[in-house]
Amino acid sequence: MQRPQVFASLLERVAEPGEAERAVSAADEIVRWPVDAVEILESQDLLRRARRSSTVTCLGCERRCRRPVCVVHGSSATAKDFVSSCHLIPGMDGFRHAPERLRRWSSSRMIVASFISQQLGLQIRGQDEFARKIRFGTWRYGNLRRAVSLEFRDTAEIVVGLSRIPLNELIIWSEDVLIFDKEALAVCADGSMELQRGNKRNQPSDIVRAHKKRLTEIRDQRLQKAVDSFNVRHPRWSKQRIAKEIARSGSFQNVSWQRIARVTRIRKK
Ligand SMILES: [Zn+2]
């Protein structure tokens, strides 16, 4: 799983109906995410460590029931083993579980809202009962003044002016940090005003299409920057090799190396 997909999964989880405050993410899923991506999410407080899981899915039979995990003292004084047993197979040795497999995390809609608040430097002004709609103050960017809110439907969306943009599309994964792409937000916010001022009434689908186009343009510019930086570091690499390297890095969502090669160029020195 690549990094942007990790964040997309997290947003889908917190968007699920349920408690507003503390949606505990299932360890079974997160332990399969790339460790470095989880670390970045933790370091930015988007994922918080929760108590270790006290149950596991039974490994002994096919019922997939939850079984309690017992802590057993291991060979040395400090070593601990985490063991579960199957109730259908008496006398069988317990199953040992690595402690990192029992890790759990929590996140919530309000945790995501705090991240946005921090990134945009805006206070949270209000929220509905289940924290599915969170309002921030007015965002100022250059000459722009726009009300910003965060809404959870199937995923998280940023609403700015008339635009509604999936949050995941506004996030840049740089080396070891997640950055909210304010430039892209500004373009979408600006676009929403242009469309609003137009003579003809625009259908919502036109607005969405216009934003998609802008986001694609912005992404292509970012891809070009990535190609340029590889080209500086590895002047002998072919465009194809650079494109494959960028696709593998996982910094861009759903972009094949072929597409990267198509929309970028190697600048002549
Ligand atoms: Zn069992």
Image (cartoon, rainbow, N blue to C red):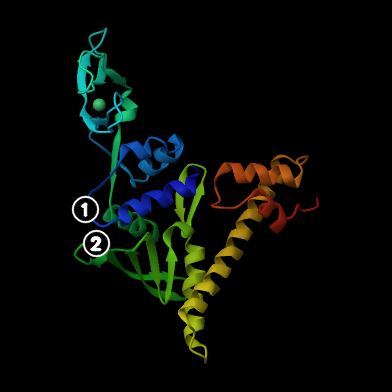
Residue 3, percent from left and from top: 48, 45
Q: In terms of depth relative to the viewer, which is nearer, 134 or 90?
A: 90
**Residue most toward the right?**
268
**Residue most toward the bottom?**
199
The label on residue 21 is 1
Q: Give the residue at mark 2.
A: 131
Seen at 73% across and 45% down, the residue is 240
Mark 2 surroundings within 10 Å by alpha-carbon count, few (fewer than 14), some (14 through 19), many (20 or more): many
- In the rendered view, tell whether residue 130 sits above or below residue 268: below
Q: Quadrant of residue 26?
A: top left
Q: Quadrant of residue 155?
A: bottom left
Q: Quadrant of residue 94?
A: top left
Q: Rounded to the nearest whole Å, what is the CA distance between mark 2 and mark 1?
A: 8 Å
Q: In terms of depth relative to the viewer, which is nearer, 43 or 54?
A: 54
Q: In terms of depth relative to the viewer, which is nearer, 113 or 258?
A: 258
Q: In terms of depth relative to the viewer, which is nearer, 147 or 204?
A: 204
Sequence-wise, which precedes: disc 2 or disc 1? 1
Judge from the rendering whether residue 138 lies leftward or rightward of residue 254; answer left or right.
Answer: left
